[in-house]
Amino acid sequence: MHNLIQWLARASALMGGLVLVALIVLMTTSITMRALNLGEVNGAYEILEAGVGFAIFAFFPICQFHGAHATVDVFTSALPARFNRILIAIWEVVLTAAIIFIAFRLYAGMERYLGNGETTLFLQFPVWWGYAASMIGASAASVTGLYCSVSRIRESVTGHSILPVG
């Protein structure tokens, strides 16, 4: 299970990275064309909006798997290791609950836009596509979060490391 979740986190991050690079190329091309008075890439902002939403959620799993989210441990670094493991487990569960909640809200938004047929202004692609793309990343983040929550709870109970700590 550990290797499967690690693979999921890496694959998700790789997809997010590829999408981010493609968005950078797209926006650079559009800005360059505008600077040279050649027009711009039509609908670039619409693509950027949907792509960045996906990329953000695509990076959550690898960050969560490695415990690499930003932390402020000024006060907790002096506390005993057991207390810190318990605190990490609690925050892991809270973060996972938040990601799952966001995933459900993304699904509700996707369902709403799927039902009303709204499209983007320039490219006329359905708005729900952006929600669906974000749902892919949010689903991977939810699965990874559930695994990490269980693993962090096990770590706090047993005192043995299962996951890396960023």
Image (tube, rainbow, N blue to C red):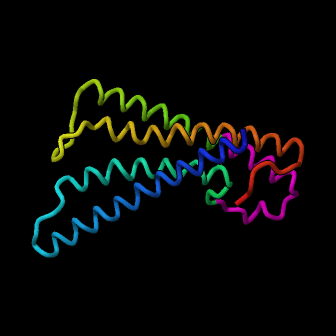
| Quadrant hosting residue 121 | top left
The residue lying at 40 percent from left, 62 percent from top is 21
The residue lying at 62 percent from left, 44 percent from top is 95
The residue lying at 56 percent from left, 42 percent from top is 141
Q: Which part of the image, by quadrant, shows the N terminus?
A: top right
Q: Is residue 91 above or below residue 146?
A: below
Query: In the shown orientation, is residue 17 left or right of residue 72?
Result: left
> Relative to the observer, which residue lies in front, 85 or 66?
66
Residue 136 screen position, x and y as percent: 46, 39
Residue 105 falls inside the magenta stretch: no
Q: Which part of the image, by quadrant, shows the C terminus?
A: bottom right
Magenta: predominant secondary structure element?
A: helix
Residue lying furthest top: 115
User: Bounds of the magenta span?
Assistant: 71-93
Residue 159 screen position, x and y as percent: 89, 48
Q: Is residue 122 above or below residue 115?
A: below
Residue 79 falls inside the magenta stretch: yes
Q: How many marks?
A: 0
Query: In the shown orientation, is residue 58 left or right of residue 142?
Result: left
Residue lying furthest bottom: 36
